[in-house]
Amino acid sequence: MLPTYDHGVAYNSSTVSLSAPLDIRYLEKKGITFVRVQWVDLTNVVRVRVVPVAYFKKVLDSPRPGFAMTKATMGLVYLNLAEGFSAMGEYLYMPDLSTLRLCPYAPGQASVLGKFQEKTPYLEEDGLASVDVALCPRGILRRVIERASLFNLELLVGIETEFILLKSTDPIEAVSYHDWTSTAGLLSGAVETTVMQEIAETLITSGVELQMYHPEAAPGQYEVVTGPLPPFKAADIVIHVRETIMNIAAKHGLKATFAPRVYMDSTGSSAHTHISVNTPGERKEAGSLTKSESHFLAGVLYHLPALPSITLPIPASYKRVADGCWTGGTHVCWGTENREAPIRLVNATAPTSRRFEMRFVDGTANPHLALAAILAAGLDGVKNKLPLNIRDCPGPVSAAQMSEEERHALGIWKRLPLSWEEARSNFRQDEILRDFFGREFVEKYLSVNKTLAESLAADQDEEKALSRLVKFY
């Protein structure tokens, strides 16, 4: 057994910083007059209805508390309706009061997420009545979390948020130029310094655990790191974090973009997703994965070629994915503290803070769907006790720098999709993921995804296309 050199802050399901949701009875006393009823569609656009508190309470007192939403809301892209959607039919969007949260960036307002339901029940194949909506991202994530509980898994998730602050989107002009984590990115009196501190203070005020923020490597690029949470809460919080960043930036005349890569001669922006896998009674030791961790990792690696259709959902996502530029590379592998692997094992010798960093996710992905896909892949590994046939690739030589024989000796045989088209094809062919998400979701998601790609490619001029991208994301 290796000696333990434990380090890092230890989190578990009972010690994470879960702030209590707002009590609906006291909204007016807190000066809240409006509630932002928010949902995130299949293109990762946050949509909203702003409702006076008085009416919001009336809705909550109704027999089925919810707001009518056209079913087309999940198929609209730039006002274009994707194939498979129509102007007919409505959902009910049911507020989830556990997500009710102050929005300090919008004084007098709070925000809430919810879930979609059918207005009228339908009969499932087993003959039971249901109001579930196949396209509801939060409903899909809820389903995979329920599966995780069957295997007695305790999962914690932390999502890093990288973005670029622009003072102009046409032409593209960053707010600042600085080296990675350089103090030149946070100079006193600069607008970007004011924006970043206000983002941090706003998040803390709204009950989010902020671990740090710092300048990243690209022009105008910054990162906000928040604490780990159970999967459902983690996905909910990243929406609040992004909304906070966008609104505070706009308040100061800037545009915050989560586009995957704005500058081809510098780093891109991602949404690295950290996942710790724990099983009560299963002891973690330094330098050795538990059975649960090993099977979970094996499952994600097995399905990794299909996951980017959801985690890297637009053609521009593949401008960020490359070998040799700290993006996780293009080979299906994992490695201890290896940023040139799509899955990095973090704190391998520190059992209390050990986790997997999924580096194949960017900010254009719907966080509930991205997390659902990754967890479904990992749970397939746990359920079927998949062996971890790919060995640790800790460096100093990356998989891309190895010979084919060296890669094969480590069990590295596959590549991530190198294009948007390949990712979509892999997703269609992955039987386990296809069955988990369901036929209706797969077909309609890919339809919306195609319409989105076509809309983003509407400008032939490269600069105009980039401008369109940063305005949308």
Image (cartoon, helix red, strand yellow):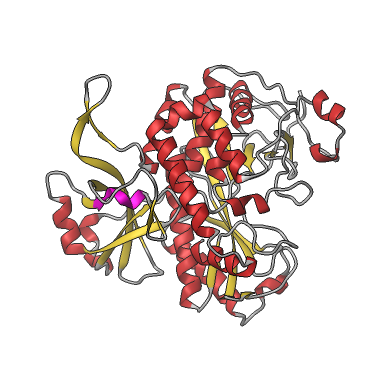
Which of these two is toward me, 188 or 361?
361
161 with respect to 127 (left or right) = right
For image coordinates 73% across by 68% down, the residue present is 182
Instruction: Indicate yes or no whether the magenta region holds residue 122.
Output: no
Residue 158 in view here: yes
Pinpoint residue 190: horizontal percent, then vertical percent.
62, 80
The image quadrant of residue 303 is top right
For image coordinates 40% across by 31% down, the residue present is 439
Residue 366 in view here: no
- Above or below residue 33? Residue 410 is above
Pinpoint residue 244: horizontal percent, then vertical percent.
46, 64
- Above or below residue 15? Residue 76 is below
Q: Residue furthest front?
A: 460
Instruction: Indicate yes or no whether the magenta region holds residue 72.
Output: yes
273 with respect to 239 (left or right) = right
Q: Please state the extent of the stretch shown in magenta in the rendering.
A: 69-74
Pinpoint residue 377: horizontal percent, then vertical percent.
54, 29
- Above or below residue 145? Residue 326 is below
Per the picture, the main secondary structure of the magenta-coloured stretch is helix
Tell me the quadrant of the picture where the N terminus can be found: top right
Pinpoint residue 441: horizontal percent, then vertical percent.
40, 37
For image coordinates 74% across by 37% down, the residue present is 336
